[in-house]
Amino acid sequence: MRRAVPTDPDDFVASALMSLDQNPEDAVQRDDAQSLVRTALLSLAPEQRRAVVLAGAYGHTALEISEEEGIPLGTAKTRIRTGSCAFAPRSNTRGN
């Protein structure tokens, strides 16, 4: 299901995934996870970040991304794949 009003993927990066949990421990863990995701996303090139967010958070296909961004399908696929591969190790580290 799509959002009624589109949200710019760059705004998604800035807005932390909100939760209604009131438990302080959950809030700390959520803040840590949000920080890791934000840092990992911001380390990507802007076009890769946008493709990863559109595909991962909004569920867009590579074809939809290519049409929205006005780029060839192969380029959209490469941005998603390259960004996802670069994003995964960064989002799983905890500063060790």
Image (cartoon, rainbow, N blue to C red):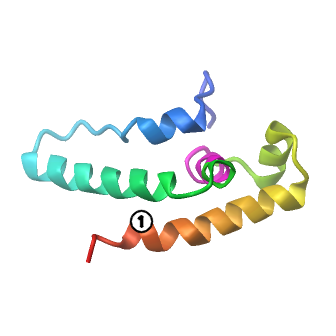
Residue 28 locus on image (x, y percent):
16, 51
Percent x, y of residue 31? 24, 49
Q: Quadrant of residue 67?
A: top right
| Residue 20 place in picture, x, y as percent | 24, 36
Q: Is residue 19 above or below residue 72?
A: above
Q: Residues within 10 Å of mark 1 (few under 14, many from 20)?
A: some
Quadrant of residue 91 in the image?
bottom left
Q: Amino acid at mark 1?
A: Ser
Residue at 73% in and 60% down: 79
Q: Residue at x 28, y 71 (%)?
A: 95
Outermost residue, bottom direction?
96
The residue at the point 25 percent across, 55 percent down is: 32
The magenta segment is 50-58
Quarter of the image with the C terminus in it: bottom left
The relative height of residue 6 versus residue 80 in the rendered view (above or below) is above
Q: What residue is pinned by disc 1?
A: 91
Between residue 5 and residue 89, name the one nearer to us.
89
Q: Main secondary structure of the magenta part?
A: helix
Q: Residue at x 17, y 46 (%)?
A: 27
**Horizontal side of residue 70 vs 90, given as left or right:** right
Magenta residue check for 35: no
Q: Which residue is nearer to you in this view: 46 or 4?
A: 46
Disc 1 secondary structure class = helix
Q: Nearer the viewer, residue 75 or 6?
A: 75
Q: Is residue 24 left or right of residue 3?
A: left
Say which quarter of the image contains residue 92: bottom left
The residue lying toward the viewer, choosing from 20 and 45, is 45
Residue 15 at x, y percent in the picture: 40, 35
Residue 13 in the figure: left or right of residue 48: left
Task: Tell me, yes or no, whether the highlighted magenta stretch contains residue 51.
Answer: yes
Seen from this angle, which residue lies furthest top?
5
